[in-house]
Image (spheres, rainbow, N blue to C red):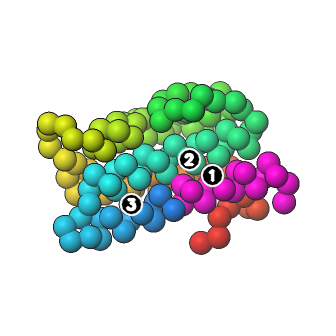
Amino acid sequence: MSPELELVRQWLEKAHLDLRGAELALTADPPLCESACFQCQQAVEKALKGFLIHQDIEFEWTHRIRYLLNLCVEEDGAFEQWRHDAEPLTEYAAKFRYPRPGPSPTITEARAALDVARRVYEFVLQRLPEETHPER
């Protein structure tokens, strides 16, 4: 495998591990909803970055899903469908990682974030060569 494809595979592997982490966080008793939401954001971010690297598109090092989606849409308009569901995950990059006032995400919100993250991840996999897909 070329070094470029291997790098894409590594990004997708990290995204897959974040999804697994979110799944495990939600099976804890009580569920670790803040951790799950953070890992869902990370999974989407890393999957989108894997796609961009495969397309040889340079990007800023950021957690902003909207920015990454904008770049993906320029290459493949089908990414547009994720704006409504995926962009809100950006707030999970930092919102719950530090002490702050306000409620934590609910189990319903965390499960919804996991659903979106899984679907975006699978969508990205469909657009990339099989050899870049992580082993499951």
In the displayed structure, 29 sits above or below 34; it is below
Q: Earlier in the sequence, mark 2 or mark 1?
A: 1
Say whether residue 52 is magenta.
Answer: no
Residue type (three-letter) at the residue carrying disc 1: Trp
Circles 3, 2 touching at the beta carbon (< 8 Å): no
Which residue is found at the position 19% from the left and 37% from the top? 100
Q: Nearer the viewer, residue 116 or 99?
A: 99
Determine which of the numbered discs, if any, sits on residue 128 in the image: none
Q: Which residue is mark 2?
A: 46
Snapshot quadrant of residue 134: bottom right
- Whether residue 14 appears in magenta in the rendering, the answer is yes
Q: Quadrant for the C terminus, please.
A: bottom right
Residue 39, position as x, y percentages in the image: 41, 53
Figure quadrant of residue 59 = top right
Residue at coordinates 21% horizontally, 41% vertically from top-left? 99
Q: Position of residue 120 (x, y in %)?
A: 51, 49
Residue indicated by mark 1 = 11
Q: CA–CA distance between discs 2 and 1?
A: 6 Å
Residue at the disc numbered 3 = 22
- The quarter of the image holding the N terminus is bottom right
Question: Relative to 42, does residue 134 appear above or below in the rendering?
Answer: below
Residue 29 picture location, percent across and down: 21, 71
Q: Which residues are magenta?
A: 1-16
How crowded is the residue under tag 3: few (<14 C-alpha within 10 Å), some, or many (20+)? many
